[in-house]
Amino acid sequence: MKKIILAAALTLSANSVFADGYTDPIVEPAVIIEEAASSSSHGILVPIMMLIFLGVALSSGSSYVPE
């Protein structure tokens, strides 16, 4: 009889240990910091400079004529 009571007590105590079941681990999301663009004029600066240099090169063309 003592063995039956002991087995019942162990069974009941084991059920209370596993009563919560499986819980997912808490994972904090990674923090992503995006740097804001300082100015939008950087994208157009290079093409404008190329047009200026091309204009200067074409306007200062030499008039060399071979003899």
Image: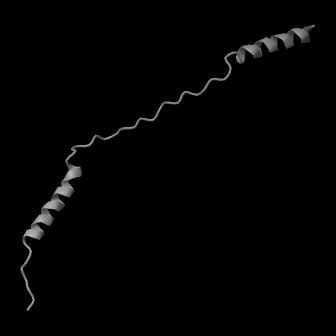
Is residue 62 shown left or right of residue 30? left
Q: Nearer the viewer, residue 26 or 33?
A: 33
For the C terminus, the image quarter is bottom left
Is residue 11 shown left or right of residue 36? right
User: Residue 53's x, y, as percent?
Assistant: 14, 65
Is residue 13 shown left or right of residue 63? right
Residue 2 to residue 35: above or below: above
Give the quadrant of residue 56. Answer: bottom left
Give the quadrant of residue 23. Answer: top right
Q: Residue at x 36, y 38 (%)?
A: 33
Residue that lies at the very extreme toward the right in this rendered image: 1
Residue 65 to residue 22: above or below: below
User: Residue 55's x, y, as percent?
Assistant: 11, 64
Residue 18 to residue 27: above or below: above
Residue that lies at the very extreme toward the bottom in this rendered image: 67
Q: Residue at x 70, y 15 (%)?
A: 19
Residue 51 to residue 35: above or below: below
Q: Residue at x 24, y 51 (%)?
A: 43
User: Residue 42's x, y, as percent?
Assistant: 21, 50
User: Residue 37's x, y, as percent?
Assistant: 26, 43
Q: Nearer the viewer, residue 17 or 49?
A: 49
Is residue 62 shown left or right of residue 11? left
Q: Residue at x 21, y 51 (%)?
A: 44
For the N terminus, the image quarter is top right
Q: How is the image coloured?
A: one colour
Q: Nearer the viewer, residue 41 or 37?
A: 41
Q: Nearer the viewer, residue 32 or 18?
A: 32
